Image (cartoon, helix red, strand yellow):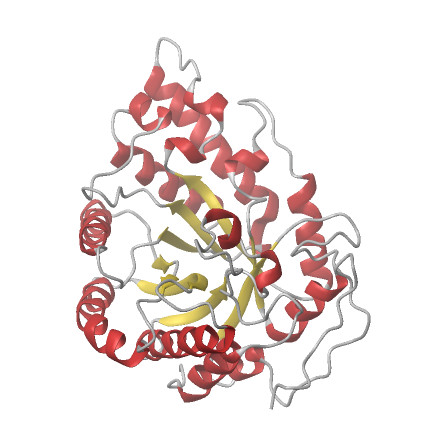
Amino acid sequence: MLAGLAVLVGARGSAASEPEVAPRSLKQLAAAKGMRMGSSFAWGAQGADRGSFANPAYAALLMRDCSLLVAENEMKWQALRPSATQFDFARFDAMMAWADANALPVRGHNLLWHQPKWMPRWEETHDFGATPARAAERLLVDHVSTVCGRYGSRIRSYDVVNEAVDPKDASLYQTALSRAMGSPEATLDLAFRTARRAAPQAQLVYNDYMSWEPGNATHRAGVLKLLEGFKTRGVPVDALGVQSHLVTQGIDARATIAELEGEWRRFLDEVTAMGYGLVITELDVRDNSLPADVAVRDRAVADFTRGYLDVMLAYPQLRDVLLWGMTDRYSWIEGFEPRKDKPRRRPCPYDAAFKPKPMYTAIAAALAAAPHRA
């Protein structure tokens, strides 16, 4: 069905021809079930070889398969806040303008990445003065209110807080903001309460990378504790963002899924029992423990993706699924964790030549088999 869906890519990554349209796109399959399919995208100069709206080849994939977008990096503090007194919206504004022109909604990612290494250097060395708690509150409220106020009802879902739980011991990370305010809980709560005031129409999400592979139990426990605390304190959190940066465990995906899904379902059951929705926010797959052979890798990645999505899509609380990139060509994983045996990673539904892979077919099949959302 998808063999003809190829985009010819020139040396600069621009499309030499329009993709041949397969019968049904991912966004059409999702819409038929009352869901939305989306992806991350980036800013780029016109025609630059990036996963950007300004790259015609990448834009064609976004237009074909997505009904929802999210900025990969351009909305984070490091991108928007060059200093405590300045904002720089130029790149994200350009991305929003393109999305608006093409009737594509955009999620907000993120209003607070609560880890020191992902906050701007100036924030971690900032002098909060004689009344640090008050100064920190002003800084955080100003950031959240300014960003939400600028985009108003154009953004209807925000990752308000990103990755606040330390997977080593389930504690909450400290930043200069939280130290000044007295606790991480006070900081996270203020971010959500401010977001609710500034964007009353928006879904407010806590987003994290706790996952179903072995070694994540402590991380999941910390996330559950955080979500329980939000409920106890009456913090306006609507959903858990499940990043879904999956890691294959071997060739036999079916056996692996049988081992993993019990604990994972128990985790999701606890989350949804508290009344939270679910969002898959950053789906891609690292081909760990797989041989170099491309056909073998692609098949195992597709099977692992299908098994995971079958579990996730069984929850009616899940309505949005976002990929963390459409094509291997621009995936962050190659730079973050290259394979030791040197073959390039293949974590996305399209390969580096913009051709659909078995992972694409697996996502399509999972969407087609998913229960309909009311």
Rendering coords of residue 373 (x, y %): 40, 81
Residue depicted at x 43% and y 39%: 112
The N terminus sits in image quarter = bottom right
Give left or right: position of 346 versus 250.
right
Q: Give above or below for 30 relative to 68.
A: below
Please name whichever residue, 345 or 321, is drawn nearer the observer in this view of the structure.
345
Viewed as shown, does residue 347 lie left or right of 43? left
Occupied quadrant, residue 100: bottom right
Could you tell me residue 287's position as x and y percent? 42, 65
Residue 341 position, x and y percent, is 45, 57
The answer to whether 8 appears left or right of 291 in the picture is: right
Give coordinates of residue 44: x percent, y percent: 71, 49
Q: Nearer the viewer, residue 203 or 254?
A: 254
Q: Is residue 135 above or below residue 73?
A: above
As drawn, 64 above or below 40: below
Residue at screen point 29% across, 81% down? 254
Residue 312 position by quadrant: bottom left
**Number of numbered discs:** 0
The structure residue drawn at horizontal position 20% and vertical position 39%, both measured from the top left corner, is 171
